[in-house]
Each structure stands twice: as C-alpha cells, then as structure tokens.
C-alpha cells in the first residue's frame, strides 16, 4: 500500500506563537513490534497544543525540538509490524498518539491505541474524537452524575463542552449549558437548557435549575469554579479541566480530572459507537488542510468556535 518514502508533518523548532509552526518532510517509519503505521485522514486540534507550543507547560511536558504536535486522528492502516494480530493493511481506524505526532500525513502508534472506525462515523468526527471525547467522558464520570440531577457546563458549545452536555443528558441529568446565544438553538436540540454569560449568571442558573444544583463541569475557567462554589455545589461535585495548577483547585479542593482516566481505545470505541447510533454528535467547526495549520490554530485561539477544528492531510 505504501509508495511514499517521506511524509509531511507539522513541526516547531522553538516555543512561540502560530508563526513557529511549519511543515517538515520526514522519513517514513517502519512499524516495530506491536506497532501500526496509519495514513491520517483527519486529525483534531486542541487548546492544550497551543499551551505546549507556547511553552506554558514546559515544566510538565517539555518539548524536544524539532517538536511535533497532535494526539487525535483517524485514518487507514498503511502497514503493521510484527505481533500485530488485531489490524491489517486497509483497515479504517480511530486512534490517539502520546508522542505529539498526529498533525501529519502518517502516524505510528501501538496497536492498543486504535479502535475500528464504524462505517457511519464521518472521518472529521472520528479524527477529532479522542482528546475532547475522553475528556468529556471523564468529566461526567468525575462529578458522579446521576439520573435526575442538575449539572451546569461552562463553554457548553466548545470542543469538550459540546460532548460533555450530550453525555450528561444521556445519564438522564438536567443539563444547563453556558454558551453564547449563537449556540443556544444547537444546545436545545441536545436537550440542554442554554444560558448566556451576560449579566447575573448565577441568578440565571438558579432560575433555570428551579431547585438544587448538584454538579458543575468547568471547561472554560475564568472564575467559573468560584461561581460553582457560590451556587452551593460541593467541591467534590465540581470538575475543572482548564489548568492543572488552577488556584481554584488548591483553594477549594475541587476535582481536576481531565482525559487521562478515559484515555483508552475502549472509551474511544464506546464514543464512536454512540456516534454511529446517532446518539452523539461531534460538532465540526471547520476543516483545514495540513499546510493551513497556522490558520487553524488562529481560529482555535479566538475561543469562539462551536465544536472542533480539524486538519486534513
């Protein structure tokens, strides 16, 4: 299947803004034991990648220059290494890499980080599923949401929030989503009560809840943990994913559970099955070509998109 000897990948040689991103030509790797080489069809981009590129997470996740980027992807198996008995050349898969390497034409991963792509799952949604999907999955689990409870989700139309509200509604919870008015119609379609963030947000939430508010999922930051505490929500029912070192986590003892607890091929398969069944939607804001990566991140960093931005090699 493979004819190329080289492939294109997004790289950056030092920390900085979107201008440090460039396309490099790299030798095509050969899969080792248990590894699968995938020709990428779609790869999602995420805010965490901006922070890594800017050096804001250099202590926790230092770059090794020239550094690549990207975790999410979907594509077609191009070759397999020895001991791979799950996938074969030509298989369509959804996966993730821990090596910051999915913003590329090809990505090499252990077979345990792949799951088959259900035929009815669009490539764009499949390629953007892992980071936001696993994070949303874990946030709903972190706040121990139960049927009949009320949960508030900040940035409810964003990459993680748009998935979290749907998963919370599937539990049978009453979901209140904070989002701009442009996204209210979509939220209502997903059985979410939309509220904008203008004026007295706390009073708007109380009025929409009409009773106790049990949990809060914060995907935006900027004081929403403080708001959740003011609403009387117990700290162990509040989860924020915005910053692992957020002072509100230390101040109140709220949860800080992100994607790690759900970063498995099994969770990926579960989410993909929901998409195939029409029970989960991964909203796609825009699709860019790989060499438009700077434009893609310029849009992402405006923080106004509904859903995910995807790169298409």
Image (cartoon, rainbow, N blue to C red):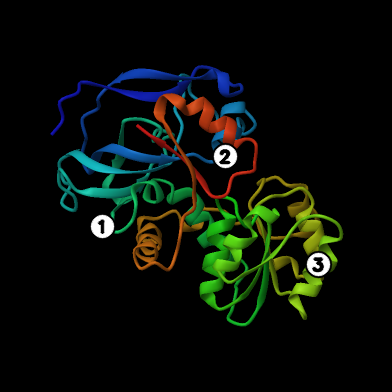
Q: Position of residue 146 (x, y in %)?
A: 59, 78
Mark 1: few, some, or many residues within 10 Å (few <14, many ≥20)?
A: few
Q: Quadrant of residue 33?
A: top left
Q: Quadrant of the C terminus?
A: top left
- Alpha-carbon distance for marks 1 and 3? 42 Å
Q: What is the number of the mark on residue 204?
A: 3
Disc 1: which residue: 119
Residue located at (77% from left, 48% from top): 222
Upstream in the sequence, badge 1 or badge 3?
1
Please state if 290 lies on the left or on the right of 225 as rendered. left
Q: Is residue 270 above or below residue 117?
A: below
Nearer to us in this view, 55 or 187: 187
Q: Is residue 228 above or below residue 251?
A: below
Please state if 80 lies on the left or on the right of 206 as rendered. left
Q: Position of residue 287 (x, y in %)?
A: 44, 38
Disc 2: which residue: 48
Regarding mark 1 in the picture, which secondary structure is present there?
Answer: loop
Whether residue 105 can be seen here: yes
Choose mark 2 or mark 1, whichever is in front: 1
Nearer to us in this view, 121 or 136: 121
Regarding mark 3 in the picture, which secondary structure is present there?
Answer: helix
Upstream in the sequence, badge 2 or badge 1?
2
């Amino acid at each position: 299947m493979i004819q190329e000897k080289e492939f294109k990948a997004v790289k950056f040689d030092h920390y900085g803004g979107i201008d440090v991103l460039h396309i490099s030509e790299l030798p095509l790797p050969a899969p080792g034991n248990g590894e699968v080489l995938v020709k990428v069809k779609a790869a999602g981009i995420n805010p965490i990648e901006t922070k890594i590129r800017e050096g804001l997470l250099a202590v926790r996740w230092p770059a090794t220059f020239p550094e690549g980027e990207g975790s999410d992807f979907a594509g077609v198996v191009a070759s397999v290494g020895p001991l791979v008995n799950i996938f074969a050349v030509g298989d369509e898969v959804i996966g993730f890499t821990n090596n910051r390497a999915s913003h590329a034409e090809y990505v090499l991963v252990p077979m345990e980080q792949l799951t088959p792509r259900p035929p009815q799952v669009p490539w764009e949604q499949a390629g953007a599923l892992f980071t936001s999907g696993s994070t949303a999955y874990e946030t709903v689990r972190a706040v121990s949401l139960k049927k009949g409870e009320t949960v508030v989700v900040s940035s409810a139309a964003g990459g993680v929030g748009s998935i979290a509200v749907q998963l919370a509604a599937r539990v049978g919870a009453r979901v209140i989503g904070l989002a701009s008015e442009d996204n209210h119609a979509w939220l209502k379609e997903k059985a979410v009560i939309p509220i904008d963030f203008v004026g007295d947000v706390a009073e708007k939430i109380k009025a929409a809840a009409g009773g106790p508010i049990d949990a809060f999922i914060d995907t935006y930051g900027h004081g929403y943990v403080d708001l959740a505490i003011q609403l009387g929500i117990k700290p162990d029912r509040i989860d924020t994913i915005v910053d692992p070192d957020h002072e509100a986590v230390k101040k109140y003892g709220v949860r800080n559970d992100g994607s790690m607890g759900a970063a498995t091929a099994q969770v990926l398969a579960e989410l993909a099955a929901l998409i195939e069944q029409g029970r989960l939607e991964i909203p796609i804001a825009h699709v860019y070509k790989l060499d438009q990566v700077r434009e893609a991140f310029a849009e992402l960093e405006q923080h106004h998109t509904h859903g995910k931005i995807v790169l298409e090699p």
